[in-house]
Amino acid sequence: MRGDGAALAGTFLGQCLPAITHRSPQGATTIHAALVQQYGFGGSHSAVKRLIRQVLAAEAPRVTSRLTFAPGEAAQVDFGAGPLLVDPRTGELRKTWFFVMTLCWSRHQYAEFEIRTMQVNQIRALIVCIGADLSQGRQ
């Protein structure tokens, strides 16, 4: 069978190929149920699974690459809105912010939650991260 659908020309599944291709990230059971409900498909679940395998085999593979770094060469930093937490002094819900830094070589992480978003807190957190890495000998 060819992955381009030529072998399916004139078949019911061949006519539904654009809809199946559009839904291919969904499971075969969901696609089969949609074909039955929307088009009155009378074929088996296995036929749909075979077609999905054929469609996926025809797609270009997703390429990934592993990034490698020397010790101390790079870090990944994230800063954003955190969960609402109860202020122990007032009992009110307070908006929080988080800071996370991951060292690329050792994968050591440092995370901190703040109630303020000032740059001073970000800089202080970076200094704590760098100090922690130096004190651990960049394991």
Image (cartoon, grey):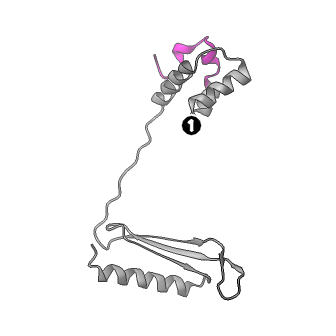
The N terminus lies in which quarter of the figure? top left
What is the crowding at mark 1: few (fewer than 14 residues within 10 Å), some, or many (at least 20)? Answer: few
For residue 4: magenta?
A: yes
Residue stretch rendered in magenta on the structure? 1-17
Q: Residue at x 62, y 77 (%)?
A: 96
For residue 66: magenta?
A: no
Which corner quadrant of the image does residue 92 belong to? bottom right
Relative horizontal placement of residue 84, taking residue 101 as reference (left or right): right
Image location (x, y in percent) of residue 131:
36, 84
Image location (x, y in percent) of residue 136:
29, 79
Towards the viewer: 104 or 42: 42
Relative horizontal placement of residue 77, taking residue 42 as reference (left or right): left
Q: Is residue 5 above or below residue 77?
A: above
Q: Give the farthest residue toward the top.
A: 10
Image location (x, y in percent) of residue 12:
64, 14
Q: Is residue 123 above or below residue 68?
A: below
The C terminus lies in which quarter of the figure? bottom left
Q: Residue at x 62, y 82 (%)?
A: 115
Return the residue at label 1. 25
Name which residue type carries label 1: Pro
Towards the viewer: 6 or 86: 86
Q: Residue at x 32, y 68 (%)?
A: 106
Q: Secondary structure at mark 1?
A: loop
